[in-house]
Every structure is written in C-alpha cells, then in structure tokens.
Amino acid sequence: MPIEILMPALSPTMEEGTLAKWLVKEGDTVSAGDLLAEIETDKATMEFEAVEEGVVGKLLVAEGTEGVKVNTPIAVMLEDGESASDIGSAPAKAKTSEAPSEKSPEAAPQKADEAKPAPAAAKSGDGARIFASPLARRIAADKGIDLAGIKGSGPHGRIVKADVEGAKSSTAPVKDAAKPADKAPAPASIASGPSSDAVIAMYQGREYEEVKLDGMRKTIAARLTEAKQTVPHFYLRREIRLDALMKFRADLNKQLEARGVKLSVNDFIIKACALALQAVPDANAVWAGDKVLRLKPSDVAVAVAIEGGLFTPVLKDAEMKSLSALSAEMKDLAKRARDRKLAPQEYQGGTFAISNLGMFGIENFDAVINPPHGAILAVGAGLKKPVVGKDGELSVATVMSVTLSVDHRVIDGALGAELLGKIVENLENPLVMLA
C-alpha cells in the first residue's frame, strides 16, 4: 500500500521545519539512501534520505513551505505494482525518513492512538458507512468538516483529499475532535512578557521594521528563557594573568609556522577547561531531570556566533587532543556552523561550554548556561593592567577576566571554585598542559 513520508525531526529542538527544496519529482524511482529533500531546521539546512525503495507518487508539500510540523505527511511513496491512482484508495503506511544522525529526544514514539492509521470507514448520523482516506479524514478534523455531507470522488465513492479541501467547514463540531485543553502549551519564550499587539501599540506612529522570527531565533529564545527560569545559576569570577601564555603561544606559533598552524588563545582555553574537568571529575557533569550524569571524557562546547543566532559545536575528548588538533577541529566546526552545515551530533551533548567575547573588546560578562550543561565559562578580553606582585612590587601585566556560570543543582560553590581554580592554573602555567 502507499507509504506516507513524514517530516522528520532532524534536530533535538525541532518541532517544525521549512521544506527548502525537493531533490526528487513525482514519478521518480528511489532506492534506500537516496536523497529526497533539503529541510531547514531551527539550526541548519540538512538533507534527508529515503529509507526504502519505491516510486514517488505525490509530493504533498510544496518547496519553500514554512512551518511544516514534525510527523506531518510531506510525500507519498508507491511500492512495486502500485500507481498514482492507488493514493487515497487505501490507508497509507507512515514512514519517517531517517535523519543522517542519531535520533533526537524530541523524536519520541507516537502515542498508541496516534500511531494507528485512521479507520477507512466510519458511520454517519443515519448509520450509513462513510469511506474516506486517512488524509481526507485528518484534513476534515482540522477544518471542522462533517464528512457525512461530502460526496466522494475517489474509487467506489471514497472521500479523498481534494473533496475535503473543496468543502466548507461544518457548523457541527466533528465528533471526538481534539479539545483546546489537549494542545501543548506554547513555548515560554513566545508566551512570556507583553503580547505582540500590546508592544506594537506602544510604538504607534513610530517608524519601525517588523522582523519575522526564524526557527533558530525562536529556539534560542525558548531555551534561554527556560534556562534562566529553571536553572539556579550562580557566578564565580577570577582574573587570569596571560603573560606566560602569550609568550608560550608566540614561541609555539613560530615553530608551527612551517606546518601552517596558528594557535589562538581560545585553543589554549579549550584545552585548559578540558584538563580542569579531568582534574575535578565531580564537576564534569550534567543535570538529567531526576539525576546527575558524570561523564568520563571532557566534551567541551564552544559558542560560535553566526548570522541570526549561534551554535555551540562540541569538541569531544578534548583532553586527549593536542593543541594543534583542537585548533584545526575548532576552525572546521566554526566554518561549518556559519554555513549551517553541522550535523546534530556535532552540536549536541557536552558538559561544559565556553563563550568568548574578548575578541569584541568585552572586558567581562555573565553567560547563560545551555541545559543540560553544568557550567559555562564567559571569557573577556586580555587587557594591560597594573598588578601587585608577590613581592609587593607594582608592575603591568596582561589580565583576562573570566566568569564561571554554574548550575547549583549539579555543582556546589566549593566544587565550582575548585574547577575555576584549575582552569586559572592551567592558563597561567601553559607548559603544564603539555605534560
């Protein structure tokens, strides 16, 4: 029987996506693994594949369509021996094309009553059976249309999609239609604060441009609002003297010049944090609802600004990698993040994050934790400042201010202070990181 291809969840936060481009057309024969379409998620534009062979019978969603909900049918595939006339004459099996990555938490199994195909027939008020395709039945439910008042144009009078789309909404409510109370609550970021109309009213008569929220901006707003509302942040601040690191970095870069390697201060910060997590293993942890997960490897996320938002690609097993390897991997991840070409597994996970605004001249700031991470390090600019040495003499040094934002559910104050102390120690004594 015909197979419905459903909009897949291609990222952990994806609830809807944009069908950017079809890579097949109706009538094309495809095999398992062939690319079907390009989907814009809240994070990236990704390709997705067919999971089995067949013929593309019908494309249900046009290119460029925005706001297509996950698990919504987007195409119908025909199996061997079937033709386009079979679409709508039998209940279609649902198939979700697999993402080129591990399944996300959002891609949860459907409820039992949602997973079953809609019945091919029901009864009208006078007891007569009504034959309708599952797609037609679903559209009728959404529009509040009584199928008893529609004449079907399909085989044997079966009601198909075109019949329902041309019908007007019924005044009588559809039996068993979903009640408003059954709907999921709106994301906190969209629902919180004054309403859109209330804000617009404040600026009556003023010239402004209305900027539409894309999926990435909606996701950032929702996740960070949730983080500030639900994660008990506390903040630890330190200043780090960078003179030894700057000299060591200059010497290393001179030696690595022939290999085309140039290490940044950020590369040293990544390594310092990764080693600190190994030295303080109790802090290498994430919040998991009703438990804490302590990880063995140091998987460090780094915030990368892109047009319209940001990514936090994860450098996995960072404690095991050389500075030059971390530098090359970070450059690659940052480039693909800006091109929105990262796979979900490249920006999921990690226990700890780094956000560096020092390159923009920011002296210090407090970063928001990205759940489920246990902490995030906000890094400011290295500035020349007067300092008092151990012998009491005044001198000038390059000093960098950092702030560690900590989830108190995962890391207590003393443990956080120990972790930050190890980060400072590593950066002020960079040779230690090569031992």
Image (cartoon, helix red, strand yellow):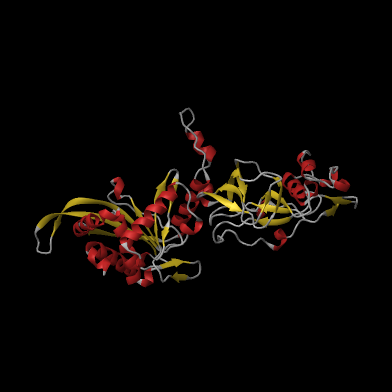
Q: Nearer the viewer, residue 150 or 33?
A: 33
Q: Is residue 347 visible?
A: no
Left/right placement of residue 117 relative to residue 398 reads right
Q: Quadrant of residue 268?
A: bottom left
Q: Residue at x 45, y 56 (%)?
A: 227
- Count how many numbered circles sit on residues in the image: 0
Left/right placement of residue 429 relative to residue 14 reads left
Q: Relative to 111, does residue 143 appear above or below in the rendering? A: above
The x, y position of residue 281, in whole percent, is 37, 72
Q: Is residue 11 visible?
A: yes
The x, y position of residue 432, in whole percent, is 24, 67
Q: Nearer the viewer, residue 383 or 44?
A: 44
Left/right placement of residue 425 relative to residue 75 reads left
Query: Residue placed farthest to the front in the image?
Result: 258
The x, y position of residue 130, in whole percent, is 86, 50
Q: Nearer the viewer, residue 399 or 59?
A: 59
Q: Residue at x 45, y 43 (%)?
A: 308
Q: Relative to 430, does residue 191 appear above or below in the rendering? A: above
Which part of the image, by quadrant, shows the C terminus?
bottom left
Left/right placement of residue 195 relative to residue 165 reads left
The x, y position of residue 285, in whole percent, is 42, 68
Q: Quadrant of residue 197?
A: top right
Which part of the image, by quadrant, shows the N terminus?
bottom right
